[in-house]
Amino acid sequence: MLKGWLARGLAVIGMVAALAPAVEARTLDQILSEGKIRIGINPNFPNMSVRNASGEWEGFDIEIGKAIAKALGVEPEWVPTETPQRVPFLVSDRIDISLGALTRNAERAKLIDYTVPLHTEVLAVLATDKIKGDSWEDFNRDGVTLANMRGNWTVGWIQENMPKAKLELVDTLADTVRLVAQGRADAIVENIDFFMAFTKNYPDVNWRVVPNPIFVAYCAIGIQQGNHNLREVLNIILYDLHSSGMVNATWEKFYGAPMLRKIEPDPYF
């Protein structure tokens, strides 16, 4: 299970060390003196960061990035950073920090440093009251249809770990939720946090998240290795943002439901 989770987005990690030699990162003093912080955001990961009708960036990461920049007393500079570019952009000093749902794992930690967690991603089961089951294993049985998106790493995970269930594949998150709402599938096994907003389109459906999650991943802010002063300041800023409730409120604003597993701020972490 953990192996499948870590496999997502790690295909390029080995190439980074060989093809992207480290360039010394800007220090906190340089960021402050230049008056801007370069923030890597994932342009293909709604609702982390998307362009609105006016062409301006908005989303969870944008609000968090603005709050960080304000606390530092600088302006944010948004740098679109595709999923496989996040680590290389840090190593090559094209960004100062990386957002974009950057999951902590051992392979990335060999190349970059992390702050304390910013948010979580919960691999769990989203179903309705029309089907029984108290754990994900209960959905691994004949007669159960699971909805998922083509190309998702979880498709392979389901095929390996839930072989008795039938898979119905579609192209978008919204279509996945629609299958379950219309009764053409029984449940979704995925990073459920990102699906909750779409359930609001079906108020007559009694949605439920199966209580026991399969796995909880912790996403943090990525910085270049050795940039310790910047990391310490970011950790303090994140503690304040978590303690004030800003992070959870912003998550619910853009994802339509509270974070399934909230971050508990720890001043000594």
Image (spheres, helix red, strand yellow):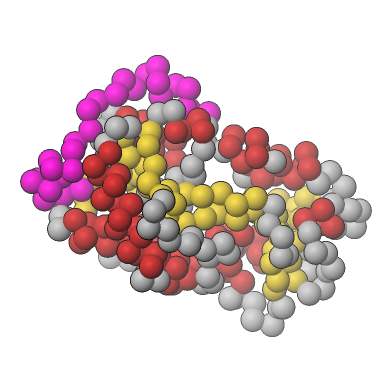
Answer with the quarter of the image where residue 205 lies.
bottom right
From the top left corner, tell me how far across and down residue 150 is, in percent.
Answer: 64, 46
On whether residue 27 falls in the magenta region, the answer is yes
Residue drawn at 61 percent across, 71 percent down: 199
**Is residue 126 within the magenta segment?**
no
Above or below, 205 relative to 265? below
Q: Nearer the viewer, residue 145 or 254?
A: 254
Percent position (x, y) of residue 11? 53, 28
Measuring 40% from the left and 29% from the top, which residue is drawn there? 111
Residue 186: percent from the left, percent from the top?
A: 79, 63
Query: 247 or 42, which lies in front?
Result: 247
Which residue ends up furthest to the top in the rendered image? 18
Q: Is residue 202 left or right of residue 136?
A: left
Q: Residue at position x 64%, y 77% from top?
A: 202
Residue 144 versus residue 209 in the image, above or below: above
Q: Quadrant of the N terminus?
A: top right
Magenta part of the chain = 11-37
Seen as rendered, the residue at the extreme right is: 142
Q: Residue at x 47, y 56 (%)?
A: 119
Q: Give the left or right position of residue 177, taking residue 240 as reference.
A: right
Q: Position of residue 193 (x, y in %)?
A: 57, 61
Q: Is residue 25 left or right of residue 110?
A: left
* Foreground pick, 269 / 231: 269
